[in-house]
Image: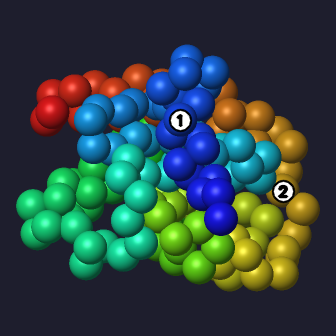
């Protein structure tokens, strides 16, 4: 079975798409989710199914990148909360979802996969989308300083 994340990572290698940041082990990817500007995924390059398939140092590295993305989201986008999730039920490839959440987002306080609570305000979404270049630049700066 083909892996969506392996295909996406291959598109980066081929120059067909670009992540926010990447190195030899990880990529930070902007997720095109209209109601959730700033939603990112941290993806381990090698196709491994579970965090426990990684060495202790590799697991620490994944989580440090997740924390740096979260800190950038908090600094630039000022969300009410940041949700972190790693499921892999549909895509068994180590990756983490890092999702800025707001009191007025479509699902708050429920998870993003639950029934919507309201329609997102287009002006609020536009204001958040306007922050994406600054968010991406902050993520790059934070990770380039560390790695």
Alpha-carbon neighbours of circle 1 within 10 Å: few (<14), some, or many (≥20)?
some
The residues tagged by marks 1 and 2 sit, at their Cα atoms, a distance apart of: 33 Å
* Label 2 neighbour load within 10 Å: few <14, some 14-19, many 20+: some
Q: Secondary structure at mark 1?
A: helix
**For the point 53% across and 48% down, which residue is it?**
6
Task: From the viewer's side, name the closer residue of 83 and 46.
Answer: 46
Residue matched to label 2 = 120
Is residue 98 visible in the rendered image? The answer is: yes
In this rendering, position of residue 101 left or right of residue 117: left
- In the image, taking residue 138 as reference, residue 128 lies left or right, namely right
Q: In the rendered image, which quarter contains the C terminus? A: top left
Residue closest to the far left: 57
Residue 115 rendering spot, x and y as whole percentages: 83, 81
For label 1, the residue is: 10
What label sits on residue 37 in the rendered view? Answer: none
Q: At numbered mark 2, what does the secondary structure look like: helix, strand or loop?
A: loop
Residue 21, how many percent across, how many down? 39, 31
Q: Position of residue 29 (x, y in %)?
A: 51, 41
Nearest the viewer among 39 and 130 is: 39
Q: Residue furthest right?
A: 119
Which is nearer the N-term, disc 1 or disc 2?
A: 1
Residue at 55% over, 18% down: 15
Residue that appears at 29% across and 32% down = 23
Q: Position of residue 114 (x, y in %)?
A: 76, 81
């Amino acid at each position: 079975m083909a892996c969506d994340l392996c295909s996406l990572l291959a598109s980066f290698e081929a120059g067909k798409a670009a992540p926010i940041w990447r190195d030899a082990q990880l990529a930070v990817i902007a997720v095109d989710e209209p109601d959730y500007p700033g939603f990112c995924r941290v993806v381990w390059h090698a196709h491994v199914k579970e965090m426990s398939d990684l060495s202790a140092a590799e697991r620490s590295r994944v989580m440090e990148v997740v924390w740096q993305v979260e800190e950038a989201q908090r600094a630039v986008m000022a969300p009410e909360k940041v949700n972190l999730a790693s499921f892999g039920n549909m895509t068994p490839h180590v990756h983490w979802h890092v999702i800025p959440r707001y009191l007025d987002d479509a699902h708050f306080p429920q998870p993003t996969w639950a029934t919507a609570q309201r329609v997102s305000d287009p002006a609020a979404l536009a204001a958040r989308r306007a922050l994406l270049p600054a968010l991406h630049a902050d993520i790059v700066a934070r990770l380039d300083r560390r790695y």
